[in-house]
Image (tube, grey):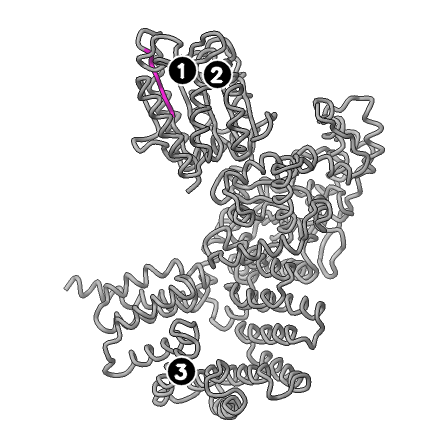
Amino acid sequence: MGGRLVLVIGSQTDGGARLEVLPGAAHNLAEVLIHPDLGRCRPALPAGPTVIDPTYRELDAALHEAFRQAHEQRATLIIAFIGHGDLNDDDYYLMARDSTGPDSQDSLLVGQRVKELLRRYPRIDGLVLLIDACHAAFGLEAVARDCLTPIRRSLSRFEVLTAADDGKAYNACMSRSLTELARTGHRDFGEHLRAEDIRGRLLSSCGYQLSLHLSFNGTDEVAGSDRGLWLLANRGSHWQGSPLAGTAFVPVAEGLRTRLIRRPVESEVAKALDTAGRCVLLHGPRDSGKSTLLAGLLQPAHAGLLLSGGELLESIAGELRRQLELTLDGFAEAVTGYWDTVPDQAGARADAFELNVLGPLRRLAPRGEVRIVVDGIDGFSGGDRDRLWGLLTRLLDEPELGAVRVITATRDLPAGLPAAVVTVPPATDAEIDQVIRSHEVPVHRVPELVRMAGRSWTAARLFSEAVAAAAISADGARLPRELTEAFDELLRRAKIRTPGPIGEQGRDVLALLAAAGPGPVLPITVLAAALGQEIAAVRTVLARLDAIIVRAHPGEDHELVGLALPALADYLADGVVLGVDPVRRHARLADVLAGAPRRGTPAADYALAAEVRHRWLGGRHAEALACLDQREARIPAEQRERWSGLAQLVSERFGADHPLSLRAEGRVATWTAKSGDPAAALRAFGYLLDRVHTLLGPAHEEALNLRENIAFWTRASGDSAPAREMYDLLLADCLRLLGPEHPQTLMTRHDRVLALPDTDALTEFRAVLPVRERVLGPTHLDTLRTRTNILYRESEVPHPPPVASRWSALVADLTNTVGADHPDTLTVRCFAAMFLAKSGEVGAALELWQDMRPATEQVFGRWHPQLREVDKQLGHWRPIYEESIGG
């Protein structure tokens, strides 16, 4: 199950000083920790998140149950204790209501008990202890002393935050300050409040006590907090109110913002924004600081994209739409209005940018400035990169959208983009000097590091961090003299070079992250499955890799992870450094993604964007084509473009006349037809057929399949008579060359029926069905499509047979075969509801339409005719049903 569990204990002690802030402080802290927008925890105990004034036995039982639940659920566990603490020599005890003194007979010996519970329940996804009691530093020392062995054995992570050192803690100040900070947040911190952040605030808010913090990453005590063991979402974050809040762009932007220094080029950018036209383009070489400048311009902006290079254009357009709906008055209504009025044919032709951005913006025609920041276009492959520049050019060329301004960056100036170009030069020695000094490097080392960095921002930062690490290192840290040595030192500090399981685990994780590409793109569920590890174990490895990775939504079920530096991704790409074959790591990811659902999860989104690429780079070229058939984009024009890109790859790899190339070109033609241009598709099919006849001969199955497509789209274009003639000739050839039971013959028989008059169609479909059931199997998708055609036509006759149960059986078979969210399943569910309504079961039909509507919108899109059909049926039958109920 994963997630986060919390137990807050507020304990008075009989005979001890009474804590007037209890039980309120405990309940208030628990309230923010289980709040869905703040702590996002579940109660660790069935009775709730708090235990108030327990006896020693009750306290111990509560802790035992909390650890057990976290172990069984593979969850992170947060335990907060507010009450009295006492010590005896170097043993530290938490006092229960009936405790008589610091003795394990009736008080909780913290280090020993936590060690025992960790030993018994080692599969916890990280432990956080908050000790708001006097002398709590001794508790921290006890946990560190007693628990490191079981922690190291299980490679677990834990953190301890105490209210005080060896002195007193007053009035639950730590817990009350934490509760207040949860409700207000703090602008100086990122999207999450971690223990190290809170300790810094406690030093000022609880002035008479000194808070201490300990963090252990599974192998070592480390400075700072584990990103996955955060305590609260930061309500006061710099990103609150930004359209980027909650996206995977935020940790990327945070990493860039930490590098901000004042540069002269900023004044040129500001001048261009004040005086230039509709686009400002930052132009400069790699590592010149363009992305850092753009990160500083994300606020204020109506939308911002920090792209990694692996996103689908459909998802990019959808994210732009989502952000503009949040920030631009009237845009959400413009989207709905545009989608409701776009004709079906125009909707089929439109690409994702037209449907999500251009069309709604035209409808809105904004008057005030609409600022959009886009970074990362250079990271895309050639075809997608050119298309992105083309889409931005379309946006900027729209005469009625003069209020829209785009700020972007590139290494190579794109042709045709109407932009004011601002040149971003490489860093100067003075700027590199400033970066190095910000890392508290010894002054005498600065000139040498400036010279070694060679005007590279990345090298300056990595060299400085290496020098700082060497100053406190006792493990032989090396001072790098070039960028590759800096990367090697980063890998060494992350224990990648360590012999045994620890180093091997780190190398395996990095190999998969290198295959996924830079940025937080790989779902942790996919990463864990590819490693064959539980997520908790993977997060322990990620904690050791903290300096070289970036994590979005850390510690949550939908966490995304990736390499922080594109240059490091390039360094690891060929597998030599890690000793891992790149082909094998792509194949591992492809195997995992094969089982991902179609929609609705991070794994599904990643599979849609990346499974084809991983299969191709994993050497499974034919599987890549089959995968793209399965992972369809919702927008036909986008699927056509994806096939065009893959067809180019196939042609470059195997040649234009290879069977895979011919198949890919055929798919391009198919999706050209589905995206509203059957005439162009028929020309493409005809050209392909001539080539196949020349290369493979007219009797080859590929030639017959192309003739099938030509007949199908001829009929779909409205030319039924020529289509029937084509089908008759094709069927005769299929029977002669392939036999009556070949799948291509059966496909031709089935599709030929669609060109026949309705009076003959039902008889022919009934004749095809038993053969398909015998040859393909009763639950093959083609067989189920024949059953669909039969049931639909039987339901339309004047006196239909009793087919209600057969509709239900067909829906069940489709669900079991291709899934509940497959387009065929949703279409058949709509047909089934129509039959129910026409047969008098209007209430049941309305429930079915209402139930399928969210999935229909998610799978097809809000602009799709299938969703309009569902809404049309709801609009038609609901008043009829309401009238019948009222009567």
Mark 3: amino acid: Val
Tell me the element at label 2: helix
Please determine whether, in this image, residue 580 is positioned above or below residue 312: above
Mark 1: amino acid: Leu
Closer mark to the observer between disc 1 and disc 3: 3
Contact, CB < 8 Å: mark 1 with mark 2? Answer: yes
C-alpha span from label 2 to label 3:
75 Å
Tell me residue 882's x, y (percent): 21, 62
- The label on residue 139 is 2
Tell me residue 702's x, y (percent): 59, 81
Residue at the spot of label 3: 771
Q: Let me know if residue 856 appears in the view.
A: no
Tell me residue 314's x, y (percent): 55, 59
Q: Is 764 displayed left or right of 800 in the figure?
A: right
- The label on residue 35 is none
Is 10 covered by the magenta stretch? yes
C-alpha span from label 1 to label 3:
75 Å
Mark 2: amino acid: Gly
Assess disc 1: are there few (<14), some (14-19) or many (≥20) residues with their C-alpha within 10 Å of its C-alpha: many
Where is residue 261, by image quadrant?
top right
Q: Let me know if residue 718 appears in the view.
A: yes
Residue at the spot of label 1: 94
Tell me the element at label 1: strand
Start-end of magenta stretch: 8-13
